[in-house]
Image (cartoon, rainbow, N blue to C red):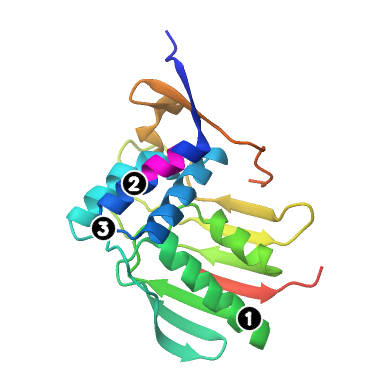
Amino acid sequence: MSAPMVHVHAAPLRTAVARMFAAAGCDAEEANVIAANLVDANRFGHDSHGVVLTRVYVDNVAAGLAAPGRTLQIVTDAGTLIGADGGKGFGQSIGVQAMRVAIERAKATGTCILGLSNTHHVARIGHWAEQCAAAGMASIHFVNVLSTPLVAPWGGSDARLSTNPFCVGVPYDPHPLLLDFDFDRLHGKSLRIPAGTTNGFCLKIITATAAATVMVETHVTEANF
């Protein structure tokens, strides 16, 4: 018997999730940024990177693995090469700051390679490519996942590998062209949402308009298309 479908509007869901992060110590702006990012991941079909992560994130704050209210710190600046430290800050807010730095540097020099370290989960990588594309920039994103293994080798039953996400974004009208994937067919986070369910319910998020998006070391380059 299939689980019942529960329809949840995106706006009140964002509000509810933001309140949870505010209770965990985030200010209103950061809480809203994290909530919007997670809900948008569900809207775009990346349920493993959606609101299912809320409890994990909040638990990580309590465990000292994630820190609210952090600001991106530049630790190396060599023109087109930038090294940055997120201070265990939430990837949703640190990522926005990092992409702003990379975009501005690429505008000044033509290209920028930015390495970001010591940051909590940066979530759906396509979000950062979309930010770059909105600024007229093509971008390439390489992500290493420092965690317990999430992916079993082909034919295996136990996880041994990282997911190693990869993303490319190119500005285009009416929406950017994105390639956003990792190197597995199914990984640990996806198993938290078997058959698209959460706690026995199918979750469908409704928005006022349909999503118009095709579904970190970051390399950002000014695009001329």
Mark 2 is on which residue type? Arg
Image x and y of residue 137, in percent: 68, 70
Q: Which residue occupies 67% across, 46% down? A: 214
Q: CA distance from mark 2 to mark 3?
A: 10 Å
Toward the right, the furthest residue is 225
Q: Is residue 58 above or below residue 133?
A: above
- The residue nearer to you, when weighing 163 against 87, is 87
Mark 3 is on which residue type? Gly
The quarter in which the N terminus is drawn is top left
Q: CA distance from mark 2 to mark 1?
A: 36 Å
Which residue is tagged 1?
106
Image x and y of residue 175, in percent: 73, 52
The quarter holding residue 45 reads top right
Q: Which mark is residue 19?
A: 2
Q: Is residue 149 visible?
A: no
- The residue nearer to you, when weighing 155 against 141, is 141
Q: Is residue 138 above or below residue 179?
A: below
Disc 3: CA contacts within 10 A as few (<14), some (14-19) or many (>=20): some
Kind of element beneath mark 1: helix
Kind of element beneath mark 2: helix
Q: Is residue 127 above or below residue 194?
A: below
Q: Which residue occupies 51% across, 44% down? A: 41
Q: Earlier in the sequence, mark 1 or mark 3?
A: 3
- The question of residue 14 being in magenta is answered with yes
Kind of element beneath mark 3: loop
Which residue is tagged 3?
25
The quarter in which the C terminus is drawn is bottom right
Q: Earlier in the sequence, mark 2 or mark 1?
A: 2
Q: Is residue 111 left or right of residue 83?
A: right
Q: Is residue 120 above or below residue 38?
A: below
Instruction: Write the start and end of the magenta stretch as one range.
Output: 13-17
